[in-house]
Image (cartoon, rainbow, N blue to C red):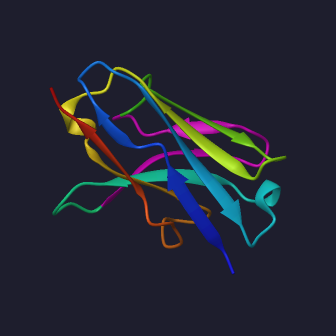
Amino acid sequence: EVQLVESGGGLVQPGGSLTLSCRASGFTFENYAMSWYRQTPGAGLEWVGTTSTSNRTTYADSVKGQVTISRDNDKNTLHLQLVSLKTADTAIYYCSNDDGTTRGQGTQVTVSS
């Protein structure tokens, strides 16, 4: 059974930083491209970025320069580093090994002063 467990969210002030993590199990992590998505209330799922099996990363234009995705295949873990956070970045962040259909429970990031 595929399991994805996101963590690391919280309340942060505008301009602050956070690093989110996603612990994966139930599949061969190193063989999958992994992605981060986010969702705000009333909005659809927004793709944030993807890291390929060869560690090539692509990011949404809306977050380019603000996020860094990395993976640790030895620990089956995916990370999302967020910097220069804005109130518009407030969302639930999910990791996924597909188009977002398979994802964990998410971790809430709230950017507020």
Does the magenta segment cover residue 97? no
The answer to whether residue 43 is left or right of residue 73 is: left
Question: Looking at the image, which residue is at 68% across and 54% down?
Answer: 33
Q: Count the marks: how many?
A: 0
Question: Looking at the image, which residue is at 18% across and 60% down?
Answer: 41
Identify which residue, 47 or 90, lies in the foreground. Answer: 90
Q: Work out which residue is located at the far bottom of the displayed protein and give it.
A: 1
Task: Note whether 83 is above or below 98 in the view shown.
Answer: above
x and y percentages locating residue 29 in the rendered image: 77, 59
Identify which residue, 22 or 67, lies in the foreground. Answer: 22
Identify which residue, 32 or 29, lies in the foreground. Answer: 29
x and y percentages locating residue 44 in the rendered image: 27, 63
x and y percentages locating residue 34 in the rendered image: 63, 53
Q: Which residues are magenta?
A: 45-62
Identify which residue, 13 or 96, lies in the foreground. Answer: 13
The answer to whether residue 26 is left or right of residue 93 is: right
x and y percentages locating residue 79 in the rendered image: 59, 40
The quarter of the rendered structure image containing the C terminus is: top left
The quarter of the rendered structure image containing the N terminus is: bottom right
Asked where in the image residue 55 lies, by quadrant, the reply is top right
Does the magenta segment cover residue 50? yes
Question: Looking at the image, which residue is at 23% across and 23% down?
Answer: 14
Task: Note whether 93 is above or below 84 in the view shown.
Answer: below
Question: Looking at the image, which residue is at 18% across and 32% down?
Answer: 112
Asked where in the image residue 13 lies, by quadrant, the reply is top left
